Image (cartoon, grey):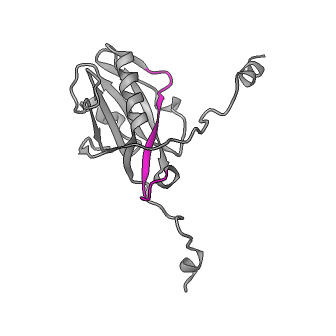
């Protein structure tokens, strides 16, 4: 057995391919988009290893939708400073809404599709059928909606007491 064979451990090298989106994450993206209407909504997508969610598949599942900090929105665009986004190893892409209901990326959208393998556009009227996934080049891609129990991890691991202490 060679060196690589002796170091290999099952599950050590898993694919980072995004294989689906958790139903709860999709519902959150749809609701956040509807709440922002008539302005656009923009957020970051985070993923979790499929096996940690009880799936017997390799890959990553979109499990979280985070508001992009410092986002400025209006009915036809959403702007944000990418340096405000958390440097998150679990980030898998972006989500934003089109209040006009058009479910295809604009040239401006494509300029924001640089980080992560999946980008979602949600359109009015924000029903379960009013979204599409794209790769970083803007080509449509399949993204299965999965019914999984998402772990209650704390992305922001602090309490109100921690915040009060920092403000003093």
Q: What's the magenta region?
A: 54-71
Picture quadrant where residue 24 is located: top left
Question: Residue placed at 54% from the left, 41% from the top?
Answer: 88
Does the magenta run of residues contain 135?
no
Residue 20, placed above or below residue 108: below
Quarter of the picture containing the C terminus is: top right
Residue at position x 37%, y 46% from top? 20
Q: Nearer the viewer, residue 42 or 158?
A: 158
Residue 41 visible (yes or no): no
Name the quadrant containing residue 65: top left
Residue 168, compared with residue 56, is above or below; it is above
Tell me, yes or no, if residue 112 can be seen here.
yes
**Quadrant of the drawing holding the N terminus:** bottom right
Query: Which one is nearer the viewer's eye here, 137 or 150?
Result: 150
Q: Tell me which residue sits at (38%, 16%) in the image.
A: 36
- From the viewer's side, name the closer residue of 114 and 142: 142
The x, y position of residue 50, in whole percent, is 46, 52
Where residue 161 appears, as percent x and y from the top left, is 75, 22
Q: Give the image location of residue 107, x and y in percent.
A: 25, 32
């Amino acid at each position: 057995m060679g060196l690589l064979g002796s170091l290999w451990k099952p599950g050590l090298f898993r694919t980072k391919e995004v294989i689906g989106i958790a139903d709860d994450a999709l519902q959150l993206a749809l609701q956040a988009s509807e709440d922002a209407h008539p302005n656009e909504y923009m957020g970051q997508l985070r993923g979790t290893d499929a096996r940690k969610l009880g799936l017997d598949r390799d890959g990553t599942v979109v499990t979280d939708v985070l508001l992009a900090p410092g986002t400025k929105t209006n009915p036809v665009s959403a702007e944000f400073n990418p340096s405000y986004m958390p440097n998150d190893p679990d980030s898998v892409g972006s989500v934003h809404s089109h209040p006009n209901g058009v479910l295809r990326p604009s040239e401006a959208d494509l300029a924001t599709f640089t980080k992560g393998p999946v980008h979602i556009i949600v359109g009015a009227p924000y029903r379960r059928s009013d979204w599409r996934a794209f790769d970083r080049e803007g080509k449509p891609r399949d993204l299965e909606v999965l019914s999984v129990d998402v772990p209650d991890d704390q992305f922001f691991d602090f309490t109100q007491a921690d915040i009060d202490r920092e403000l003093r």
